[in-house]
Amino acid sequence: MRIKSKICNGTLYVVLSGELDEHTASHTRMTLDDVFGGGDFSQIIIDLSELEFMDSTGIGVLIGRYKKMRNRNIPIYICNPSKHAEKIFKMTGLYELMPKIV
């Protein structure tokens, strides 16, 4: 799992690359917590165009970050989901928590 991030005009952009599963969940969780904990931003956009695979553990990682940011009133949006990620987000209702944007 590779995670790239940048802040631009008050938005934190995060790109997840690779696989988000039980093997990468701990690293991803810690890295996202570090990225989400610093900087001055009012919203987060997570780009999933490079995410190749995600299982239920990965869903848990994203929901956990959503809950932390919700407590700070910072919304999270999803963009460019792969076909695999799109299917998971629709099936689980994750778009209700983290809306898809174009």
Image (tube, helix red, strand yellow):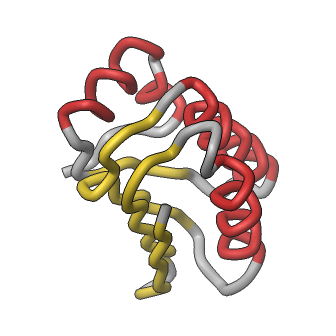
Q: Percent from the top left, x then y, of residue 51? A: 34, 51
Between 46 and 27, the one lying in front of the other is 27
Q: Residue at x 64, y 58 (%)?
A: 28
Quadrant housing residue 83? top left
Q: Is residue 10 above or below residue 2?
A: below
In this rendering, position of residue 12 left or right of residue 65: left
Farthest-out residue, front: 23
Quadrant housing residue 23? top right
Q: Percent from the top left, x then y, of residue 43? A: 53, 64
Q: How many marks?
A: 0
Q: Percent from the top left, x then y, of residue 26? A: 74, 52
Q: Residue at x 81, y 48 (%)?
A: 71
Q: Is residue 43 above or below residue 67?
A: below
Between 97 and 16, the one lying in front of the other is 16
In this rendering, position of residue 14 left or right of residue 58: left
In this rendering, position of residue 85 left or right of residue 9: left
Between 22 and 11, the one lying in front of the other is 22
Farthest-out residue, top: 91
Q: Percent from the top left, x then y, of residue 98? A: 48, 39
Q: Residue at x 26, y 31 (%)?
A: 84
Q: Is residue 15 above or below residue 49?
A: below
Q: Residue at x 75, y 74 (%)?
A: 34
In this rendering, position of residue 22 left or right of residue 3: right
